Amino acid sequence: MHHEGLLALRIRGWGEGRRQGERDVRRRSAARSRLPCPGRAIPGPSADRGVTGARARGGPQPSRTLRTRQRGVGPGGTVHGSQGAEDGPREPTGTGARSGPDPSPAPAPAPAPDAASGPDALFSLAEVLDASAPDGGSPASDDPAPWPSATEAARLFEIREIYAEPEAALSARGRQVLARFPGARLIEVPSHWNIPHLHGNEGNARRWVRIKREVLVLGVRKTMTVRPNGRSADWIAPGPSNGCALACAYCYVPRRKGYANPITLFTNTEALIARLARHSTELGPKPEPNQCDPHSWVYDIGENGDCSVDALLCDSTAELIRAFCQWPYAKASFATKYVNSALLDLDPRGRTRIRFSIMPEADSRLLDVRTSPVAERIAAAGDFLDAGYEVHFNLSPVVLRPGWQHDWTELLRHLDDVLPARVKQQAAAEVIMLTHNKDLHETNLGWHPRAEELLWQPAGQEPKLSQNGARNVRYRADAKRQALDRLRELTTRHAPWLRIRYAF
Ligand code: SF4
């Protein structure tokens, strides 16, 4: 009964909320076309107002009672609907995104429905779309949000399951994302965080890459803490996502997420932007230059994901970039390993710093699964600068192995050879030595053991208590210090224009 009530609410909210969402999108779009970037109003909380309003009003009843069907769910609770994926292509074959290991050789059962949400929470999104469309047609056909990244998104995503908090699924942004994957099954979860049969299912480690391709999570960000940093940025902003469709073996994001790390998109971007607007207004002008930036307070907006990849799925990255255009004392910053050409259309007006993360190609081929090739990231720098971004580089992570100095030398020479002078004039770099984590090491052994041969070197690593209290490992202090000194020397010699902002 509880679930039927929720579902009925969802369906009523869909029709009314969608129409409200369309009105909001049209209004925002008209406002944007009237205003130059610096004068644009902060997008208001219209998206969620639509949902709230639908809830308050109740909205029209659906024309028929929608029964929650468990298509493809066997008697034991095993979802057969995604088994076909096991036989499908391992990775997109298009250019750009790099495919990687997915050593799940035998068909493996998809995760069973979450006990917390129960089988009644599993239903076909297409069915909901069909039942709630005013004219009986598919709302996806009149999705108000254009999706210019659809072709690029198809290289990384083949979404089959979307776990969603009800509030996130009902929001305008959530509905836009859902409408883009009408074949996906929507699974209601009480919280985007720690979904037991996703993050807690040890068997998912073997399907690490596949889950990134086939699963999305939609949630509402509850905490809006802006944390001081002082290294990469002055402040770490509450990000619009957590998790990533790329699969770098050293990524720190999954260290506390268990056995799966697909993208969780937070749908309440407007609340996030409002928080940042207040924060930067209260700070006022930056009193003095520091290594983060000589003039602006720098906010890292992508601490736990890749904003270039998020932009393939929703408008959060675009909304943040537009918002920073109007804040005189603030600058956005995010690191990326994916070249998303759609970002070139956003007109950031120098208020967003994009940091292309690079490492020697030999390391990247093994460790940077699903990313754009390093040479492509470097080649894109000029285009992004011309489009209005500040372009920096992350030399990270630096992985110590035989031959590392030679390969970093080659990379620095390559930067010097191919980057246009205008990129060099404004470029700076962060250098970050590899850190790792025992739990992630063991998870990685399930999907990418070759990477662990390089990353996990107990003889040369020592425990480290990170700022967030996590117990990680890093290279031993003396080796790390020598390596950083050596990399500074190599940079001075082969790319003397590249100012190293900080190294640790
Ligand atoms: S691109 Fe960044 S967030 Fe994504 S997997 Fe790689 S390190 Fe993690």
Image (cartoon, grey):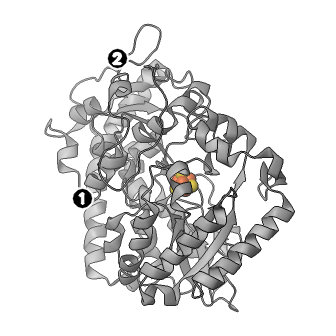
Taking the image as drawn, is residue 241 in sight? no
Quadrant in the picture for the N terminus: top left
Answer yes or no: disc 2 within 8 Å of ligand 1. Answer: no
Classify residue 51 as left or right of residue 226. Answer: left
**In this view of the protein, can residue 483 be seen by the observer?**
yes
**Crowding near pointer 1: few (<14 within 10 Å), some, many (20+)?**
few
| Identity, as a three-letter code, of the amino acid under mark 2 | Gly
Question: Residue at the location (13% across, 39% down)?
Answer: 135
Q: Nearer the viewer, residue 33 or 6?
A: 33
Residue nearest the viewer, comparing 42 with 411: 411
Q: Quadrant of residue 467?
A: bottom right
Give the residue at x 27% y 23%.
65
The numbered dot on residue 72 is 2
Left or right? Give the position of 71 relative to 333.
left
Q: How many marks?
A: 2
In terms of secondary structure, where does tag 2 sit?
loop
Q: Are marks 2 and 1 in contact (CB under 8 Å)?
A: no
Rendered position, 51 above or below 403: above
Indicate the position of residue 405 as horizontal and vertical percent values. Answer: 66, 67
User: Hey, what amino acid is under mark 1?
Assistant: Pro
Q: Residue at x 60, y 77 (%)?
A: 429
The mark found on residue 146 in the picture is: 1
Question: In the figure, 2 relative to 391: above or below?
Answer: above
The image shows residue 382, relative to residue 27, as above or below, that is below
224 is higher (above) or lower (below) than 120: below
Disc 1, SS: loop
Query: Is the CB–ligand 1 distance for label 1 below 8 Å?
Result: no
| Residue 448 placement (x, y as % from top left) | 57, 38
Q: Residue furthest top?
A: 75
Viewer-nearest residue: 228 or 46:
228
